[in-house]
Amino acid sequence: MEKILGIRLEDKNKWETRVPLIPEHVAQLVAHGYRVIVEPNPIRCIHDSEYARVGAELSDDLSHCDVIFCVKEVPKEKIIPDTVYAFFSHVIKGQEHNMPMLRRLLETNCTLLDYERIIDEQGRRLVFFGRFAGMAGMVDGLWALGQRLAHDGIENHFIPIRTALGYFEVEKAKNALRMMGDRYKRNFIPPDIAPLIIGITGYGNVSKGAQEMLDCLPCTEITPVEVPEVATRGGDGMIYKVIFAEEHMFERTDESPFELQHYYHHPEKYRSKFEQYLPHLTMLVNSIYWDSRYPRLVTKKFLRELYADESPRLKVVADISCDLEGSVEATVEATTPENPVYIYDVDSEAAVYGHGRGPTVLAIDNLPCEFPVDSSRYFSETLLPFVPEIADADYTVGLDAIKLSYELKKALIALNGELTPDYEYINRYMHDEEEAIYE
């Protein structure tokens, strides 16, 4: 039987122009006998005609599709009953804003496969945009740093940097940074703000993407142990980069030695020790995974104490992870590419778009959309090997009988209107959300 695959338009916001599958890969699917229907979208980063050219159909009606592929969440009112969906659902942490969507998926007997949960047996993600989130986040962070320093009356070489969306392509952004670095060589940082230390948390795909961009500038890597000494050394015109792993950020509450696996399995027995580094950083780039089981990295309380000093070193927090009031508690709201930053005001504990006392916070929750073509191409390359298996599976049978690989079974959040066993815990978040509606 012919399988029909749908590619839904993205409507999260006007900047979300990415695609889950690029025309080149759609052509391969069509050649292998799949029928592909693409919902027209005038803002898509790849023109609809490119899909038509490779044999896809253009139609506003995806109701006959066996599987519908998207990038971001589907508005609950646009969910098609009895449909298999694949997208980033952002429900596994019980995110309140997506509980109505998940409830609607269950009520309409839908199946949900979440890209974020396509993982191997070591828990490594196999389909992701993370590298591009890191790259866009670093570019935007450097832009924010230039703007913040200028606002504070400090002339600096970051001012000409644009946001990632202003470059649109990764190579254009890299070339701009390299040219800037070559121009100023070892005198990139003026003496009155040196030494300039940029701290990056984590070492995964997001962190690697952020480092990839930062390394286009004159940059020297130091270890966390070196941070306090470098901070008091004075300036030599260089940017210092420091990568923080879990053992640098957290410690056992009982003062036993740090053990990584123990931390993962018993995060409640750990606390942050990151405050010893934070006063020495000019910019923090946060790229770690966080959920409510884990200790916070940066608290509102500490920022209030830090900003009791009239001129703290910390100027910018680029929170790529963007968990609201999560690992960085000062991430009190998400931003957009159009208005990417706010001041976290330590007095009101609120986001201020203007003047305030606190760090500049970058908190765009869909950063890869700023490099839409590059990120879509990479994502499509990682997703394509799984598409035939996703398309050909019979979802009417029970979970144990579905012919899906380990990686894809782990990604099934819901099957035919029921949460799968690994994700039944989300029920309590939907219950909490329902109670809140009637309070």
Image (tube, grey):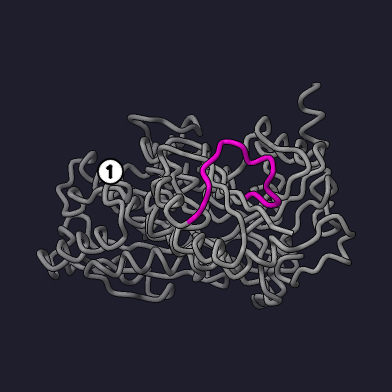
Residue 257: image quadrant is bottom right
Q: Residue at x 62, y 72 (%)?
A: 124
Viewport quadrant of the N terminus: bottom right
Q: Is residue 28 visible to the viewer in this orientation of the structure?
A: yes
For disc 1, the marked residue is 148
Q: Position of residue 312 (x, y in %)?
A: 34, 49
Secondary structure of residue under mark 1: helix
What amino acid type is highlighted by mark number 1? Arg
Q: Is residue 126 left or right of residue 237?
A: right
Q: Position of residue 153 (x, y in %)?
A: 18, 41
In front of the other: 180 or 24: 24
Expressed as whole percent of the image width and height from the top left, the position of residue 396 reads 86, 55
Name which residue lies at 38% across and 30% down. 353
**The C terminus: image quadrant:** top right
> Predominant secondary structure in magenta?
loop
Q: Looking at the image, which residue sits at the far left? A: 183
Q: Residues within 10 Å of mark 1 (few under 14, many from 20)?
A: some
Q: Which segment is the magenta one?
A: 55-68
Q: Indicate yes or no whether the magenta region holds residue 57.
A: yes
